[in-house]
Image (cartoon, rainbow, N blue to C red):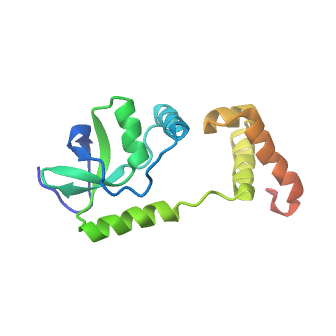
Amino acid sequence: MKKKKGDYQDLRLEVIIIPEHAMRNEIPEESILNLIESIIKYGLIHPITVTPYGPNYEVIAGMRRYIAFERMERPTIPCIIMESTNEQTLMRRYIENMERENVNVLDEALFIQTMMETLKLNGKQVAERIGRSDQYVSDRVAVMKYHPGKLIP
């Protein structure tokens, strides 16, 4: 199999190696379970990124997705194949993890409000779709009361 930079293809899980130098040493179990539920409901939105490593491939970005596919006992996972030196691989892992910031509560509240209005959903329906409790969604919607300037027109 020819390995080209930027190739996208489904790879068998057994040819993918977990990185020796992962950015995150612990991934909360709840995080994996929520991801599995999301993949089952909506499919995988972003493929993982891997780099050739001998006859195999090493994960650059997407460890949680890889673990989720393993737990679901899926034989293959969509991958973007990227040629990468060791330094590039470590930097890409760092950047990929550090660029992901927690979403601002107000932005999340606005997005939930948008989903409710656009999709004509109530709080319970939104909670089911995003994998959160009814109370969580209610709390986020309540934030909008304190920031009326941010309400959707």
Instruction: Give 97 or 37, whichever is nearer the viewer.
Output: 97
Q: Nearer the viewer, residue 132 or 9?
A: 132
For the point 39% across and 62% down, the residue is: 93
Q: Position of residue 111 (x, y in %)?
A: 69, 51
Examine the rendering and report whether any part of residue 3 can be seen: yes
Query: Looking at this view, is 113 or 54 the one in front?
Result: 54
Place residue 66 in its image quadrant.
top left
With respect to residue 58, does 95 lie above or below? Answer: below
**In the rendering, at what x and y percent does residue 69 appear?**
37, 36
Residue 116, percent across and down?
Answer: 73, 42
Question: Would you say residue 122 is visible in this rendering?
Answer: no
Q: Point out the residue furthest to the top here.
A: 73
Quadrant assignment, res 127: top right
Quadrant where the C terminus sits is bottom right
Classify residue 18 as left or right of residue 23: left
Asked if 21 appears above or below 71 in the picture, the reply is below
| Residue 121 left/right relative to 14 | right
What residue sits 85% from the left and 63% below the top? 149
Position in image of residue 102 (x %, y %): 61, 57
For the point 75% across and 44% down, which residue is it?
117
Task: Tally the marks.
Answer: 0
Against 31, residue 40 (above or below) is above
The residue drawn where x is 51% and y is 34% is 33
